Image (cartoon, rainbow, N blue to C red):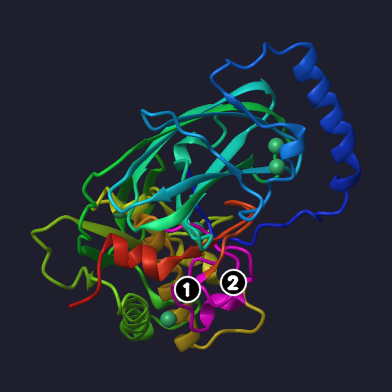
Amino acid sequence: MTYTRWVVPRPSPLPRSLALLSVWVVVAASVVGCAPPPDPRFQREARSSEPNNTFDSAIRASFDPSGTAYLWGLIDLGDIDVYDLGSLQAGDHVRVQLEVTFGDLLPTTAIFDVEGRLFVTNPVDTVGSRSFEFSEIVRHDSPHYFLGIAEEFGTQTAGSYELIVTITRDGQVPAPRAQIIVLDFNGGRTVIDDVGTFNLSSFSATDVGFDDEQTDELIDIIYQTFDENFLPYDVVVLTTDDQQPDEPYSVIHFGGRDPDLFGISENIDFYNRDPEDQAIIFVGSFVSVFGTEPTLEQMGVALGNVGSHEAGHLLGLNHVSDPYALMDSTHPPDAFRENQDFLWTRLARQIFPIGTQDAPLLLYETVGTRP
Ligand SMILES: [Ca+2]
Ligand SMILES: [Ca+2]
Ligand SMILES: [Ca+2]
Ligand SMILES: [Ca+2]
Ligand SMILES: [Zn+2]
């Protein structure tokens, strides 16, 4: 899976609206006519339950005594179904099993707290799947958690689903764990799991249109930008000039070029299960992409911010839509040569059509605060 921060063209939301009703009728009729009736255990989303497209209009999921809810519903083009899972406490374990039972629906799911802040989504390796499961441990108490289902962004698919949500109570909350991140400017053969093998040249300021003598100054600006972005969090930022740490560490490589990408990360590693994952910043992609020619300082800030963005993915953060946020994926490149930070702001529509991501909270829950 590749995660980029290239500007993604956004289709106009208007033309689809006319098609909605007819597609609903076709899918609904087909489900009634052809699909087997849902298992009687499943709580059926009735037409009268719609719109249930927001946290405020969520359908209350009913759980059996063992803590399992069986939910059945229909996603029409542009539809979102939101279920209220009720109150969850830190340490509760939530397991989601989703299966598309009819239609061409490519589903995506996300769970949010009462403030609409993202808790977890289905993992990136389930993108394009019609059946998947995932689980996660709740990090903070909330009187309501909400589970949303929608079509994957831009797929224009629809269908019915069966959703089984199982909650196991009274578990342990994993303690936040510090993370070391090494900024690697040396180049060389770089193997990134599930992504590919790259032969990167060692970093030079000439890669981004400056003089070779400015390389050390540029690296210093990149380091300072990166370190400033992670200042509140227990993330130790090193470069390949530092002694190689004994503990596990993640690596952000700076080198190479790619026709479509500024950077690529191994994963969106929710709650940082893997402390040894990697990302690449394709420095050659930063030439001739800005509205005006950047200064050396602006180029260093842009490289440091995009490096921080990829590191954010390696710590579990998703894309948002906000030019001041490091995890932004929807604004032109000029945004990331200015100061950006990890912010609580709205999710990119590509991730989920409603809700926010509180990046500072997720980072505190994942790596903790810097001592
Ligand atoms: Ca629905
Ligand atoms: Ca709905
Ligand atoms: Ca990681
Ligand atoms: Ca910043
Ligand atoms: Zn990204």
Q: Indicate yes or no whether the magenta region holds residue 337.
A: yes
Q: Is mark 1 within 8 Å of ligand 4?
A: no
Count of marks, rendered view: 2
Q: Is residue 299 left or right of residue 28?
A: left
**Percent coordinates x, y for residue 128 in the rendering:** 57, 33
The residue under the point 72% across, 31% down is 46
Q: Quadrant of ligand 2?
A: top right
Q: Nearer the viewer, residue 2 or 219?
A: 2
Where is mark 2, residue-wise?
A: 322
Looking at the rendered structure, the secondary structure element under dot 1 is loop
Residue 294 percent coordinates (x, y): 55, 84
Q: Is residue 35 above or below residue 3?
A: above
Amino acid tagged 1? Leu
Q: Which residue lies under the disc numbered 1?
A: 343
Return the residue found at the far left.
246
The quadrant in which residue 141 appears is bottom left
Residue drawn where x is 41% and y is 58% of the image? 142
Specify the principal SS of the magenta part: loop
* Dot 1 and dot 2 residues touching (CB under 8 Å): yes
For the residue pair 120 and 51, the one nearer the viewer reads as 51
Q: Which mark, residue 215?
A: none
Q: What segment carries the magenta color?
A: 317-344
Q: Position of residue 249 (x, y in %)?
A: 20, 58
Marked residue nearer the N-terminal end (1 or 2): 2
Front one among 127 and 367: 367
Give the answer, above or below, for where 66 lies relative to 87. above
Q: Residues within 10 Å of mark 2 (few under 14, many from 20)?
A: many
Can residue 201 be seen here? The reply is: yes
Q: Quadrant of residue 149?
A: top right
Q: On the picture, is 208 further left or further right than 37?
A: left
Mark 2: which amino acid?
Asp
